[in-house]
Image (cartoon, rainbow, N blue to C red):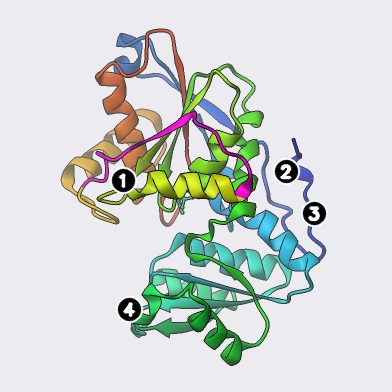
Amino acid sequence: MTNLGRVELTGCGHADVRLPSPLEEVDDELLREHGVRLLLKRDDLISAEVPGNKWRKLHPNLRAAHGQGHSTLLSFGGAYSNHIRAVAAAGRACGFSTIGIIRGEEHLPLNWSLTYAAQQGMRLEYLDRTTYRSKHTPAVVDGLHERFGDFYLLPEGGSNALAVRGCAPIADEIDEDFDAICCACGTGGTLAGLAAGLAPTQEAIGFSVLKGGDFLTEEVRRFQEEAGVVTDNWSIETGYHFGGFAKHPPGLAAFIEEFHARHGVLLERIYVAKMLAGVYDLVARGRFRRGSTVVALITGPAEGT
Ligand SMILES: *Cc1c(COP(=O)(O)O)cnc(C)c1O
């Protein structure tokens, strides 16, 4: 498969990209008790500016945008979107202008996430929540072209066929035998690509961070179809949303604190902590047979680290 470390974009300053991302073993009593080996695939360390799955998903798109002669990227997201920050930073590093279409009304002063995006040179525009819901329809997109001219459109969350293909080589970077690889799911694009890159005996498990995550099964299948990489080696856990998107109950906070104290890794709380708490619960329930090796994909860094 492609060596992502050598992907180059004309005019793109990705000198800090660290690939393959490190693999770290976690030693824990619970894991030993159940005979499970747990490895963290530290994609959060790929790059400070465009970390984790955001880099995996964006870099093939930026290359396509460049190849098609676009000079502007436009995308959508909420007021705290990791994807919006990543687009702003990647656009700046690679010489694109960026436009962020933010859900809802403008609130001033800007929060830390939008402040960061603006500092990267992103132009911020706002869509009322009703229009935002139909943001990917031709009517809305045509309207955006009328206002902003030519741009390369990245869907909300950045998941499209190229993004899915960008996640496929993750498993290839892991030079240890493993049985299952786990990741958090927002749109499901990362899981779709991750699963596509596995060996026949391996499985991918996604953890929905949204309440009512059953819809993700159809989404992941659709992403795989669009990318031309359909596999049946993945499943989605829908019981670890901890109350819904961006919800942060005390039980989750305690898990983050304990993991940090034991292993020195501060977990990102919207996605990564829910996935890993889910992995620990599955281990405790005997989901993984004794002697198996499980990889947890750390898709992004904790806020402010
Ligand atoms: C965006 C994001 C995800 C969600 O990835 P999808 O491909 O949309 O499922 C997971 N983890 C982190 C840290 C993210 O920022």
Which of the two labelled residues, at mark 3 and mark 1, occupies the earlier sequence position?
A: 3
Which amino acid does the dot numbered 2 rest on? Answer: Leu
Q: Tell me what residue is drawn at x 53 percent, y 19 percent.
A: 178
Q: Which residue is mark 1?
A: 214
In what element is the residue under mark 1?
loop
Circles 1 and 4, Cβ within 8 Å, touching? The answer is: no
Circles 3 and 4, Cβ within 8 Å, touching? The answer is: no
Tell which tag, 1 or 2, sits nearer the viewer.
1
Expressed as whole percent of the image width and height from the top left, the position of residue 253 reads: 24, 44
The magenta segment is: 227-242
The Cα–Cα distance between marks 2 and 4, rounded to whole angstroms, is: 37 Å
Tell which tag, 1 or 4, sits nearer the viewer.
1
Expressed as whole percent of the image width and height from the top left, the position of residue 205 reads: 42, 32
Quarter occupied by residue 130: bottom left
Other-residue count near label 1 (Cα within 10 Å), few / some / many at <14 / 14–19 / ≥20: few
Q: Which residue is mark 3?
A: 8
Check the picture and name the quadrant holding the N terminus. top right
Vertical relation: 278 (above or below) 134: above
Q: Find the residue positioned furthest to the right.
A: 10
